[in-house]
Image (cartoon, helix red, strand yellow):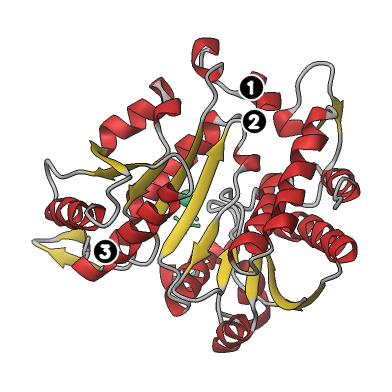
Amino acid sequence: MEFKVGVIAGDGIGPEITSQAVKVLDKVADVYGHKFDYTDILMGGASIDACGVPLTDEAIATARSCDSVLMGSIGGNTSTSPWYKLEPSKRPEAGLLGLRKALGLFANLRPAVLYDELKGACPLKEEISDKGFDMLIMRELTGGLYFGERKTVTENGEQKAIDTLTYTETEIRRIAKRGFEAAMKRRKKVTSVDKANVLDSSRLWRKVVNEVSKDFPEVELEHMLVDNCAMQIVRDPAQFDVILTENMFGDILSDEASMVTGSIGMLSSASLNETKLGVYEPSHGSAPDIAGMDIANPIATILSAAMMLRYSFDLEKEADAVDAAVKKVLKDGYRTIDIMSEGKSQVGCRQMGDLIAERITR
Ligand code: IPM
Ligand code: MG
């Protein structure tokens, strides 16, 4: 089959990690007889430098014309990069938020899995890491604090900043449905995370999630407050299957969940809408401090490409082959510096891409 893949290389380590994912996709194409046509799309700092804004209408139109979009990472050093002297709506991150909104990517899937081979890199006590864990964070991505009205005003001689957290029933229902659907394909448990002891938006969240759960009688539903959830992720991560949560909580909890897997360099993500078009990106940032040094871990981006094969192209076997190649490379003892441990072979970004591509088989 033939697919048009938009590629947002982005900033920092973005270009080097996306090249590795493209290398792996090309190997998949070879081995399974597909064709991927790539189209570069500018976004973030790269787009600011070339076009003066972090996301152009043309970039959005190109993304829409693709079957799916693979992304590296965007943004620079927030203290030193000139991009952060621009007003907030012109900075790199605004490009990413603009793309999510323009494409209606309301469902953000962030799997956090502890690989057997990386148990040593898990910062938790052995009695916890020994149990392993495999959770999927289903994060709402186009609502809440990120997209509510915001402003800074001067009142009584001092500045006052206002951000608003809004959710409609429709927004909650559609993401809840995705959470339950995902759980049906996994271990059939949903933990819905909110702050219903304080926030109205969370009380509505809980009510709608309870309603949606009636359509999924096989799925066990529990509600958990976000502060407790943050604690449970380090106390007993094995208890989680699908964590269903709103935008901001999902942002924070997914960084926490990724860290307990040993490295944020291992976490993939998919941002989906009602169609097959999705944006696939690692959960980590652009790591400008190590950009261009060929030491970044490309695995999260490669696993994101695997999610693209699975969710946008329905190429299950091919996606499994990429996941298996990543496991194999870890089993064979290869590590980038972020997941390096004694007795293993340290490799750079490019070599990690080669080693994974070599392990793609039918
Ligand atoms: C993420 C990132 C973004 C977010 C930033 C770059 C705007 O942290 O994808 O988790 O907060 O959503
Ligand atoms: Mg984040």
Residue under circle 2? 115
Of the image marks 1 and 3, the number of the one nearer the N terminus? 1
Residue at (86% x, 36% y) in the render: 347
| Residue count near mark 2 (Cα–Cα under 10 Å), binned few <14, some 14–19, many ≥20 | many
| Residue count near mark 3 (Cα–Cα under 10 Å), binned few <14, some 14–19, many ≥20 | some
CB under 8 Å between discs 3 and 2 = no
Q: Position of residue 236 (x, y in %)?
A: 41, 22
CB under 8 Å between discs 1 and 3 = no
Q: Secondary structure at mark 3?
A: helix
Residue at (58% x, 88% y) in the render: 61
Callout 1, which amino acid? Lys
- Residue 357 shows which numbered tag? none
In 3D space, how far apart are the residues under numbered discs 3 and 2 (Cα atoms)?
Answer: 32 Å
Callout 2, which amino acid? Tyr
Residue under circle 3? 173
Q: Position of residue 178 (x, y in %)?
A: 39, 59
Q: Position of residue 313 (x, y in %)?
A: 65, 69
Q: Position of residue 176 (x, y in %)?
A: 31, 57
Residue under circle 1? 119
Mark 1 C-beta closer than 8 Å to ligand 2: no
In 3D space, how far apart are the residues under numbered discs 1 and 3 (Cα atoms)?
Answer: 36 Å
Callout 3, which amino acid? Arg
| Residue count near mark 1 (Cα–Cα under 10 Å), binned few <14, some 14–19, many ≥20 | some
Q: Nearer the viewer, residue 267 or 10?
A: 267
Q: Secondary structure at mark 1?
A: helix
Mark 1 against mark 3, which lies toward the viewer? 3
Q: Is residue 120 visible?
A: yes
